[in-house]
Image (cartoon, helix red, strand yellow):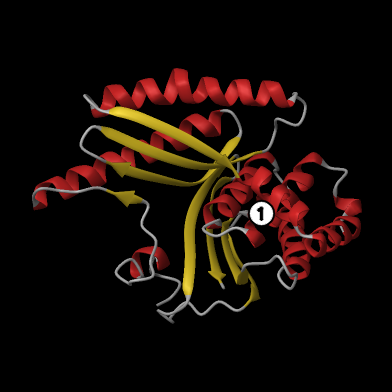
Amino acid sequence: MGQKVNATIFRSGLKNSDWSFKYTNQNSEESSIFLYKNIEIQNYINKIFKHYDIFVTNCKIEHTTSTVKILIFICKLNFAKNKLETNKHVLSNIITKILTLSTNLYLKNKITIIKTQDLSEKFQIKINKNSNYLYVYKKQIRSFKKFLKDPMQKNIIKILFIVISEKNSAKLLADIISLYLTRNKKKHNYLLFLIKKVTTNLISTNFSSIKGIKIIITGRFNGAPRAKSKNLTIGIIPLQSLNAKIDYYNSTAFTQNGTFGVKVWICEK
């Protein structure tokens, strides 16, 4: 049952579950309207940031009588060639000229306040504050030195460091796997090898906030004539235990060899 049920929805009724939406409904009909609008806003935000190679890990929306507050957790990948000032300039243009105007037109008569938080910058601040974290981080980077020559592998390792240390990061891991499958016709088995090697080393570090990761990928690996399903389990994943905090996300990669289904479960401490 644990693999056939959305783990996030299955645990949404518990007291310790996190909600991405906050609103006050006057009747039962307004609740479904708010839910529909929030899902549409989330999908639009994901499409806009994906166009600029920025991954959205989570999006929290809070409705009040006159304003709508949106907090977006992002992770930038392919801005390494540009300067930091250019990165901030592009990000501010996305928020002010695209997202704010669009959401104001969609919601009508409400002021939209959008803020972003970069998880890569948050991770660097967390590492630099603690000397023990910094020592372990540098030691792990040296062990992965041979994988850092390829830009795509470097981005995957960067994402895995964030996934290990941040909560609610299953979407981030599923999206980077889908991106790799889309841009690489072959070497799909190498992707699973890289994820397993890196996460096995990182899951036992002192800055890790997860107990285990489970990944299921279904599709035509390396252009094979038939689709296969491959499972990768690292650590502890109690899918049928309601007390366990499980973050789940499924993504679809559209490739020349057909579609790949990617499912990710992360058990947090």
Q: Position of residue 27 (x, y in %)?
A: 8, 50
The answer to whether residue 180 is left or right of residue 169 is right
SS for dot 1: helix
In which quadrant of the rendered view does residue 91 lie? top right
Q: Position of residue 156 (x, y in %)?
A: 72, 49
Using the rendered image of the protein, determine whether residue 187 is visible from the camera's viewpoint. Answer: no
Kindly identify the residue that appears in the image at 33 percent across and 66 percent down.
12
Please say if 67 is above or below 20: above
In what quadrant of the picture does the N terminus appear?
Answer: bottom left
The answer to whether residue 197 is left or right of residue 31 is right
Foreground residue among 135 and 258 = 135
Q: How many marks?
A: 1
In what quadrant of the picture does the C terminus appear?
Answer: bottom right
In which quadrant of the rendered view does residue 192 lie? bottom right
The answer to whether residue 167 is left or right of residue 204 is left
Kindly identify the residue that appears in the image at 71 percent across and 65 percent down.
207
Please say if 145 is above or below 99: below
Using the rendered image of the protein, determine whether residue 208 is visible from the camera's viewpoint. Answer: yes
Q: Residues within 10 Å of mark 1 (few under 14, many from 20)?
A: many
Foreground residue among 30 and 70 = 70
Kindly identify the residue that appears in the image at 47 percent across and 35 percent down.
115
Please say if 152 is above or below 95: below
Q: Position of residue 214 (x, y in %)?
A: 59, 69
Dot 1 corresponds to which residue?
A: 162
